[in-house]
Image (tube, rainbow, N blue to C red):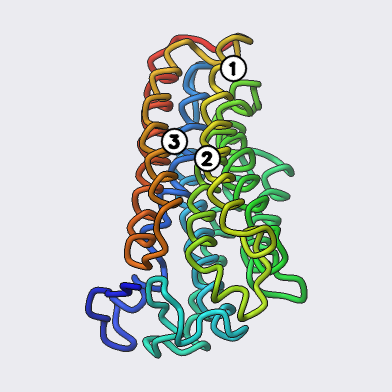
Amino acid sequence: MSTSHRPLPAPGSFGAWVLASRPATLPVAVAPVAVGAAVASTFGSLRPIAVVAALLGALLIQIGTNFANDVFDHEKGADDAQRIGPPRAVQKGLLTPSAVRWGMALAFGAAVLTGIYLAFVGGPVIIAIGVLSILSGIAYTGGPYPLGYNGLGDLFVFVFFGPVAVVGTTWVAIGQAPAGAFVASIPVGALATAVLVINNVRDRVGDTRTGKRTLVVRYGRAFGVTFHAALHVAAGLAPIVGVLAGWLPALSLVALPTLALGFGVTRVLATTDDGAKLNGLLARQAKVLLAFSAILAAAITCSPWLG
């Protein structure tokens, strides 16, 4: 299988830190904030500084989680020499485990500082969301019961990049959590989870070898492909239900055609085990998430009111 990559950055360089931050995953943090802010905008004036703070906090938690994954996966042996995914900073000797741990602490620490302001705006519920998000980011691959190693990674991604992030953003922006925010969070969480599914299909052989019991490892490749398709079905049904119930504006449905791109990803996922192609699918899936979320957010923003 092809596993070609771009030339690696120099050890300890800024480029090494960029690689460890996994910039291709950052749309997963941006999308829910955009949708949550769009829902909030239809209910009158919102707090723009709170939205910016929510975006910054989401990005910092995502980066901190990526640093945690880099170092903990290496220490658990998941990122071994036979890995077919993109290179990891600790695995390739670009950054030391100690340095990445410090980077993780700094990212999460900065997120806490952002969270202090958000807690002042949004109250105790935001404190709970922030604490759970950081602890879950660490526990995804670290701690005594790592979520990603015990088949709970998909649930983690759906919950925290769907309902928690979308509804949390709406809450800090306007001080309430309307039904439209919950419904709009479902496709965002589903499409974010679809990114993880591709990752798990690609890594299933190595994960099996190193004891990482993802859902794809437990139930097989065919399950992963079917699950990927089902997530896009869920992403399409949620806005339809939301419109019929009066929780989302009819214009929200203009986002649905982007799901055809996601089903195109499913078709390729079903037919290839080439590492380079699967890495490319990850980027394509992230673009599907970003495109769907951007169109949905724009459509909601252009609508005057949500019931």
Rendering coords of residue 191 (x, y %): 50, 41
Depth check, front residue: 142 or 288: 288
Quadrant of the rendering where the C terminus is positioned? top right
The amino acid marked with disc number 2 is Ala
Q: Secondary structure at mark 2?
A: helix
Depth check, front residue: 152 or 2: 2
Rendering coords of residue 114 (x, y %): 53, 54
| Mark closest to the chain's N terminus, 3 or 2 | 3
Q: Nearer the viewer, mark 3 or mark 2?
A: 2
Depth check, front residue: 167 or 195: 195
Q: What residue is shown with label 3?
A: 34
Give yes or no for contact between labels 1 and 3 (Cβ–Cβ under 8 Å).
no
Residue visible at 41% across and 68% down in the picture = 21
Residue 182 drawn above or below residue 209:
above
User: CA–CA distance between discs 3 and 2?
Assistant: 24 Å
Residue visible at 64% across and 65% down in the picture = 217
Quadrant of the rendering where the N terminus is positioned? bottom left
Give yes or no for contact between labels 2 and 1 (Cβ–Cβ under 8 Å).
no
Residue 245 left/right relative to 196: right
Q: What residue is shown with label 1?
A: 242
Q: Nearer the viewer, mark 1 or mark 3?
A: 1
Q: Secondary structure at mark 1?
A: helix
Give yes or no for contact between labels 3 and 2 (Cβ–Cβ under 8 Å).
no
Residue 301 drawn above or below residue 260:
above
Q: What residue is shown with label 2?
A: 229
Residue 173 left/right relative to 286: right
| Mark closest to the chain's N terminus, 2 or 1 | 2
